[in-house]
Amino acid sequence: MIEIKDLHKSYKMGKNSLHVLKGINFSVEEGELVSIMGSSGSGKSTLLNILGMLDEADEGSYTLDGVPIKNLNEKLAAQYRNKFLGFIFQSFNLINYKSALDNVALPLFYQGVKRSERIERSMAYLEKVGLAAWADHKPNELSGGQKQRVAIARALASDPKVLLADELTGALDSKTSYEIMDLIQQINDEGRTILVVTHEEDIAQMCKRIVNLKDGVIIDDKKITQVRAQQNV
Amino acid sequence: MFSLERWQEVFETISKNKLRTFLTGVSVASGIFILVILLGVSVGFQNGIESQFQNDAENIINIYPGETAISFEGFNKGRRIQLRNEDYEIVTENSKQEIEYKSPLYQIFAGLISHGNNSGNYRVEGVLPDYQYLEKADIIEGRFINANDNKAKEKYAVIGNRVKKDLFEDESPVGKYIQVSGLNFKVVGVFTDPGGDREETRIYVPIATSQIVFGAGTDIRSMGFTLPKEENYDLALKQSNAFAAQAERMLKTKLQIDPKDESALFISNNIENTKEIYVLISAMRVFFWGVGLATLLAGIIGVSNIMLIIVKERTKEIGIRKALGAEPLSIVGMILHESIFVTSISGLFGLIFGLVLLEIVGPMVELDFIKNPSVNFSIAVSTLLLLIAAGAIAGFFPAWRGARIKPIDALRDE
């Protein structure tokens, strides 16, 4: 599903150049649940941004579902993001003047789906994350866990190939974190490919594979026995 | 721009941010309001100046006869030329230019006029209805001569205010009779004239009546014309000269006058005296448009500023939208759409408010130099188009900035 070869990325900080990714080789099969771990500064967020087409690599190749991701203009990048990817952020990034339902429907709006169908499909995803009853509520009327559920429903709405989650439990307490991870595992069980960036060991253990990043290189990449979040709830 | 989905988005954003939208709207509405009022006042100035400076219509062209100075086609020189009704008709029917007002004139200079025991010598002029506008006579009581009066050769008279004071003192003369050369004429109206007493000692009667009463047959003494007002002096001058030259040519042919004869027919063309007025009015129009547009520009800059702040405030939202698949063009569209919508609607309010105010208050304004300020339809339409353009301009820079927002920067956690 994802093929990365010899990826390099550096940032200019004034006169100095900061080499963040120093040759990453990495691939993900369909249906995997991968956690990318590393301390801050290890380059894990940069990697995720490149995977999410929010940022571009200096060198190396990136193929997503057979499509080479290279030299994208903004328009094409937007279309690919919409078609291939679903984002889940630490700070949820919901639009606060829109209801939960309208937030979930937003990717569909940019796909050009008609309003009635948008509502119907978004409602189905809200139901899936257990928030159908909260469809008309604004984000500020929801708890952190509920907000993240809405964000997950939104990420699923466009039926993407890959879900990219950046510290998705970073702003949640551990009980809520496990509930969210339980949801992520269920979605993965249905066959969806998911990448989770985290620095929390217990969250990483709930994935099926852990990739360890340090100073811009992968130091460790191993399959693990998944801990079911359900047991910890 | 016209998709229903986009409208729903725009309405949603606007209704969720009422105060912001309201403040934006007020600055545009007031800009347009001031522009409309200024344009109205400029028209008022124009009206005021025109009525102040001129006794007669400022662009009047008079044609009256003289004596020939060159013998021509068997006629000796020194022949007195007499104009007739048919000559007037030749000019009016064959003119290539559009004529605004026209009238022939037959007059006697010292008619003995009496009412009861009062009497005096006044000039009696036989005219057609348009003559009121050629002379700029203002009716203060009753009415002017009309077309039916002339057709029926009625013995009706419209008297000057001076005549009224002399003959009727404080009485109302309308419906009463005066004697003109021993015949009873019914007074149908009283006029004042910006020319003052000298021009208010006249009595107007239908020309057909005057020709019978004074035994003139079809003779007329002169004829007067005005052409419609032009955009600028040069054009007015050109039209006016073309009309005069054409009338001269036709009359000289008809009356058998040598084309080179300069004393047989006199054409007084007033247009050159109007140059200053044209210049003054156009200078004023430029001034008022200038001030008005500057005001509007300030409004547009205000909107642009507010939209920039809005974009800044919505940076994160725009970043989210882009991460979810919004193309840059759709962000530009969203912001432009909102900007044009807000400026158009609020501008429309300002426009309507300004127009209504002018409509209600305008006719009441009767100062020395401002008279009936108003704005015509085409100006209202062009302001409206200006508004939509203004919305686009005001929205463009913020939209452009919005489109350049990088989702990665916008979404970075603080």
Image (cartoon, grey):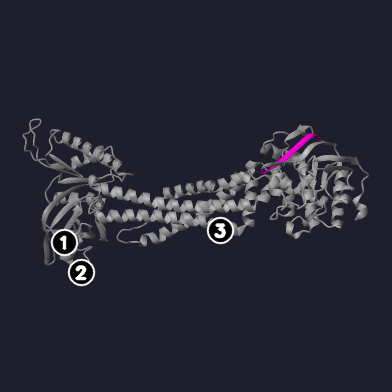
Q: Quick one: B99 or B234, which is closer to the camera?
A: B234
Determine which residue is flagged by label 3: B23
User: Is the C terminus of chain A in the top left, top right, bottom left or bottom right quadrant?
Assistant: bottom right
Nearer the camera: disc 1 or disc 2: 2
Q: Quick one: B409 or A9, which is closer to the camera?
A: A9
Q: Quick one: A119 or A19, which is closer to the camera?
A: A19
**Which x, y percent locates residue B353?**
47, 58
- Taking the image as shown, residue B273 lies to the left or right of residue A193, namely left
**Residue type at mark 3?**
Leu
- Marks 1 and 2 in Cβ contact (< 8 Å): no
In which chain is the residue bearing label 1? B
Q: Assess whether residue A204 is covered by the magenta stretch.
A: no
- Marks 1, 2 in one chain: yes
- Taking the image as shown, residue B172 lies to the left or right of residue B213, namely right
- Marks 3 and 2 in Cβ contact (< 8 Å): no
Determine which residue is flagged by label 1: B178
Mark found first going from the N terminus, 1 or 2: 2
Report crowding for label 3: few under 14, some 14 to 19, many 20 or more residues within 10 A (C-alpha).
some
Nearer the camera: disc 3 or disc 2: 3
**Which x, y percent locates residue B138?**
26, 58
- Taking the image as shown, residue A197 lies to the left or right of residue B322, namely right
Determine which residue is flagged by label 2: B170
The stretch in magenta equals: A3-14
Measured Cα–Cα span from mark 1 to mark 3: 68 Å
- Residue B351 visible in the picture: no
